[in-house]
Image (cartoon, rainbow, N blue to C red):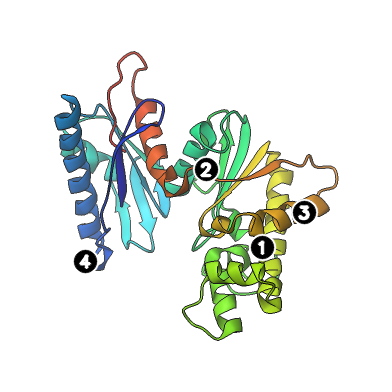
Amino acid sequence: MKAALAGPSGELLHQARRPTGRERGPDAVVEGILDFAAELRAHGERLFGEPAAAAGVAVPGIVDEEQGIAAYAANLGWRDVPLRRLLAERLGGVPVALGHDVRTGGLAEGRIGAGKGADRFFFVPLGTGIAGAIGIDGRVEAGAHGFAGEIGHIVVRPGGTPCPCGQRGCLERFASAAAVSEAWAAACGDPEADAADCAKAVASGDPNAVRIWQEAVDALADGLVTALTLLDPRTLIIGGGLAEAGETLFTPLREAVRQRVTFQKLPSIVPAALGDTAGCLGAGLLAWDLLDHTDRTEVTP
């Protein structure tokens, strides 16, 4: 878990981290979040002489932002947690915003990160899976049911590798950091090898690494062109672990997307700027959005 005290323009005033404790079960995770938020609020009061005026929290899985409910998260094991209400109670009734981790990270990248100034952007972090955040005029679109932006489950290889979502050939089964790690570990015979190792082998010219990497890039380009055809973003922001490969990823990806567009307008394809602080900063922005702009103090995301 990452937390911070955030100023009105997204500036980090204080940061802290701690394990989720998910091995102790979902109830312990929820209690850990509540305790962490309360401690951070108290720390802010000691630092600035007054408590935080609002709080924001971003969680993975299925999130009902309107109702403030963390509906489901496979990796945390919870279902239908009224997290907004629980946090408001623990924090003495301050306003609380609840957001989806990827959409919240996209909000930060769009407002104060790589997409700053773009009226339309699409943020895609390439991690264990692949999701996306659709940015429109400084906000992020959640969709009618909270599923907007799930580019990782666009089918790019029909009949391909089974996906836990129930489909076959989903983008995240070919172009996520986890997928590249799995493919490279099998190819090089080292079960501990990961996507970063594959990127290094690509840079050194290893033919197996180059093949695996290009397959991932091609799948990602297919998914991105589908997205840009539907959304027409001005900027595509690529983040997550795979993006840490830098131009080893971005040079072939830009070329692969360019080759695939026909009538579409080619967007800028840029690396994310905020790293793993994006979700935390985005939670702070959600909190600020709850407040009257004439009465702002430090916020606990």
Question: Mark 3 = which residue?
Answer: 255
Left or right, residue 162 beside residue 95: right
Dot 2: within a 10 Å radius of its alpha carbon, few (fewer than 14), some, or many (20 or more) residues? Answer: some
Q: Nearer the viewer, residue 298 or 223?
A: 298
Q: Quadrant of residue 83?
A: top left
Residue 155 marker: 1
**Mark 3 or mark 4, earlier in chain:** 4
**Mark 4 or mark 1, earlier in chain:** 4
Q: Nearer the viewer, mark 2 or mark 4?
A: 2
Residue 160 locus on image (x, y percent): 67, 74
Task: Give the vertical position of 299 relative to 99 (above or below).
Answer: above
Disc 3 and disc 2: Cα gap in Å?
Answer: 21 Å
Question: Mark 4 = which residue?
Answer: 24
**Mark 2 or mark 1, earlier in chain:** 1
Residue at point 43% right, 49% down? Answer: 276
Residue 179 locus on image (x, y percent): 56, 70
Residue at point 62% right, 68% down? Answer: 174
Callout 4: SS: helix
Q: Quadrant of residue 154?
A: bottom right
Dot 4: within a 10 Å radius of its alpha carbon, few (fewer than 14), some, or many (20 or more) residues? Answer: few
